[in-house]
Amino acid sequence: MADYLWVLIPLACLVLIVLGAIGVRKLQGFTTGQIVERAAPAQVLAEGVPAVATVLATADTEMRVDLVYVLTRLTLRVEAAGPVPSFIAETVVPISPVKLAEFSEGRLVRVKVDLATRQIAIDQPLK
């Protein structure tokens, strides 16, 4: 039995490292999923008023969804239709690296707005 310990101990350590890495990845996915759910509520997309927003600033949150999509903090000036004056809003959205240029400063993006709460959701493809 003692002859096999030099094989079993490193193997057990390797298994623990792999399982730990998988656990961390699952926890990271759960955390980023919570951020995305808060950032773009389905209700605003379904019931919100269409509007146009100008991207004022972008910031990488240094978080990724599925190791690809960049969670990006967007600061927007929203121009809602009707009597609502323009306002500044901030949201965090997962954007494909291929689409990042479409959300650079100065660009116009389509959004939906809940006029009562001024909550916004991006209304164009991010991925």
Image: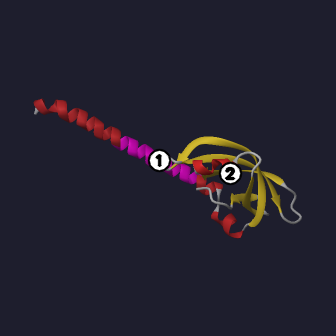
Q: How is the image coloured?
A: secondary structure
**What's under tag 2, amino acid-wise?**
Glu
Quarter of the picture containing the C terminus is: bottom right
Mark 2–mark 1 Cα distance, whole angstroms, equals 30 Å
Magenta stretch, overall SS: helix
**What's under tag 1, amino acid-wise?**
Leu
Residue 109 colored magenta?
A: no
Relative to 110, say whether 25 is above or below: above
Image point 34% across, 44% down: which residue?
19
- In magenta, the rendered stretch is 19-35
In the picture of the structure, the residue carrying the numbered disc 1 is 27
Secondary structure type for disc 1: helix
Quarter of the picture containing the N terminus is: top left
Instruction: Pinpoint residue 52: horizontal percent, then vertical percent.
Output: 78, 59
Q: Quadrant of residue 15?
A: top left
Instruction: Pinpoint residue 6: horizontal percent, then vertical percent.
Output: 18, 30
Image point 64% across, 46% down: which residue?
72
Relative to 36, say whether 15 is above or below: above
Relative to 39, say whether 47 is above or below: below
Instruction: Pinpoint residue 61: horizontal percent, then vertical percent.
Output: 62, 42
In the picture of the structure, the residue carrying the numbered disc 2 is 102
Horizontally, is 39 left or right of 64 in the view?
right
Secondary structure type for disc 2: helix
